[in-house]
Amino acid sequence: MKKGFLAIIFLAVLIFTGCSKKDSPETAAKEFISSFISGDSDAFNKYATDATKGVFILAMSMKCPQDKLKNDMSECLKEIGKNLKSVEVQKVQKINDNEAMVTLKETHANGKISNEQIPVIKTKDGWKVNIKK
């Protein structure tokens, strides 16, 4: 009985750790930019430094009503990312142990493809996008 219970616990741990996203510069950059396509405000908040949040909340406030920005940020994120179709990591350049530059290939709704360099830093909470202006 005890062995069966331990086996179930072990399997549960494997499943949950296998489903979690890797903490890396590329994950932070891709998930942050993808949050604008999906409207995932949790990913936006998880993968952005406070400075980055400030820059993007200011940009969103110009396109999104204040009450929506406070109550349903997901719609505001989608408004900013409405012309973005997909995001793919092209390259990661580590600057040092705590900083990296991630190059993303962004495919737009009109078919245009662009490359975007996203600065990321390692914080006590993991890798985060660090856009200051």
Image: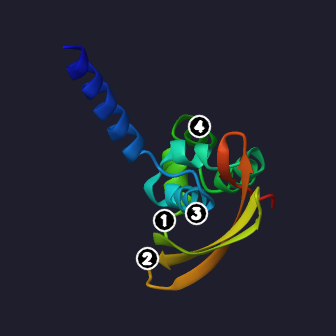
Residue 106 lies, in percent from the top left, at 53, 76
Circle 1: element type: loop
Q: Nearer the viewer, mark 4 or mark 2?
A: 2
Question: What whole-number distance in Å separates the C-alpha atoms at marks 3 and 2?
Answer: 23 Å
Residue at coordinates 53% horizontally, 47% vertically from top-left? 43
**Relative depth, front residue between 17 and 72:** 17
Circles 3 and 2, Cβ within 8 Å, touching? The answer is no
The residue labelled by disc 2 is 109
Circle 2: element type: loop
Q: Which of marks 1 and 4 precedes in the sequence?
A: 4
Question: What whole-number distance in Å separates the C-alpha atoms at marks 4 and 1?
Answer: 20 Å
38 displayed left or right of 132: left
Circles 2 and 1, Cβ within 8 Å, touching? The answer is yes
Residue 112 lies, in percent from the top left, at 50, 85
Instruction: Give the position of the C terminus as an image quadrant.
Output: bottom right
- Image quadrant assignment for residue 120: bottom right
Q: Nearer the viewer, mark 4 or mark 1?
A: 1
Q: Which of marks 2 and 4 precedes in the sequence?
A: 4
The residue labelled by disc 4 is 67
Identity, as a three-letter code, of the amino acid under mark 1: Lys
Identity, as a three-letter code, of the amino acid under mark 4: Asp
